[in-house]
Image: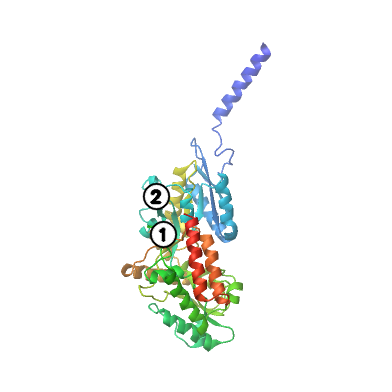
Amino acid sequence: MKHRLVILMLGMLMVFTAACSGGTSGGGESKDNAAGGTDAGNAKQVELRIMWWGDQKRADITNEALKVFQEKNPTIKVVGEFAPSTGYFDKLNTQLASGTAPDIFFLGGNVVDYANKEVLLDLTPYIDKELDLSDMDQSMVKYGTIGGKLLHISAGANARGVVVNKTLFDKAGIPVPQDGWNWEDFARISKEVSDKLGNGIYGTYNMSIDGMDIGLKQQGKQLYDLDKGTLGFEEADALQWFNYWDATVNAGGVVSSELHVSNPPGDTSKSLVVTGKVAMSLIPSNQLAALQGLTQDELIMVQLPRGEKGTGVVFESSQGLSGYAKTKHPNEVATLLSFFINDPDVAKILGNDRGVPVTSANRTVLEGQANAVEKIVYDYTSRVSEATKSEPFAVSYNPPGFSEYSKLADSTMYEIGFGRKSVEQAVKDFYEGTVKIFNNNQ
């Protein structure tokens, strides 16, 4: 009996000691809460997972920003993970299929695909509460609103434009193009640069795929009409666009298909712009710094050549954050998203890595500390913003099944470029394939 009494008293003593200890935050987290920050007191710590794509530099600055968030929000622990862009969406899709996706993940132009899968958290109930959008560009709010629900928060904005290797133009003795030029000017100038410099130097990369949605908007059409839930163009519209590029290629001045394959314009480390072999290419504005950092040549940006309806260029979401529909912590998710776009300390850390800040206050913060290249980007985006006031265009959304569409579009360009199909046949197959992909992904 005495033995049982001793055991009972020891048990009660252990319970009393644990109760007085105050507990640990986040299931055994160390005192610094992985943030070097403040003890959360009696508040229970919540853990969020967040995943993004990019290189080590992006990982470092994103983790630094998340550390600041945790210091200012000690009741929320954030575990970050990243993957290279080539494997990111495979990883995300696997996690979504198994129900183990992060609470927050980054998406790009494929946000519509994930909205259709109904895996994104509706953030509408958190607006003006945990989520402050009062200083966010309305075009970015609209971009993230799909089917009447706010499903996506843009982390940065950019505007596509033509990067111009001014050094090559100076060597050729040709004035650099100016805003307001047209596609006839573009074809002529591309050939002039190539003819003047020779020796395997080209006027431009082939923009028939990367610029197709812009070319369609310049005709009053669009790649995908989100409001109607339909494709926004016909086969004849695509034929007009591909015919222009075929004629421009045949006239001279456009990078060969062989070089386009081995030195794709989207890979900054392989871009022929930075090696002084190509004078012009289509890029998102936030890519200028990466390109300039790889070359001694002077790079600038001009607006795309004008079409019938204008430039077709608007501020676009470079990428952004969405919450997982099955998250157990939606309020904390909204809190982190709001912090990511509004906090000035975070803006200083992230800079323009994911594009120009989507709030005017943080743009002002960065403009005050901008270097020479960043000033070019801010000047360019300001010109685009001003142009859209008189020539507004719809925001571009990628169609459902975009990864399949992208492969089809690329193969179409190469089938024409390598002479495997006529333009007419290639475009016919392209349009039929696009319709099939679209219908299969509704």
- Position of residue 77 relative to residue 195, above or below, is above
Q: Nearer the viewer, mark 2 or mark 1?
A: 1
Residue placed furthest toward the right = 3
The image shows residue 233 at horizontal and vertical percentages of: 41, 66
Say few, some or many: other residues with alpha carbon within 10 Å of mark 1 (under 14 / 14 to 19 / 20 or more).
some
Residue placed furthest toward the top = 1
- Position of residue 143 relative to residue 95, above or below, is below
Quadrant location of the N terminus? top right
Say few, some or many: other residues with alpha carbon within 10 Å of mark 2 (under 14 / 14 to 19 / 20 or more).
some
Seen in the image, is 216 located left or right of residue 295? left
The image shows residue 379 at horizontal and vertical percentages of: 40, 71
Residue placed furthest toward the left = 390
Question: Image point 49% across, 71% down: which residue?
Answer: 427
Seen in the image, is 375 located left or right of residue 26? left
Count of all numbered marks drawn on residues in the image = 2
| Gap in angstroms between the C-alphas marked 2 and 1 | 19 Å
Q: Which residue is mark 2?
A: 149
Disc on the earlier residue, 2 or 1: 2
Is disc 2 placed on a helix, strand or loop? strand
Question: Image point 59% across, 86% down: which residue?
Answer: 199
Residue 278: name its quadrant.
bottom right
Question: Image point 58% across, 27% down: which residue?
Answer: 17
Query: Which label number is shown at residue 230?
Result: 1
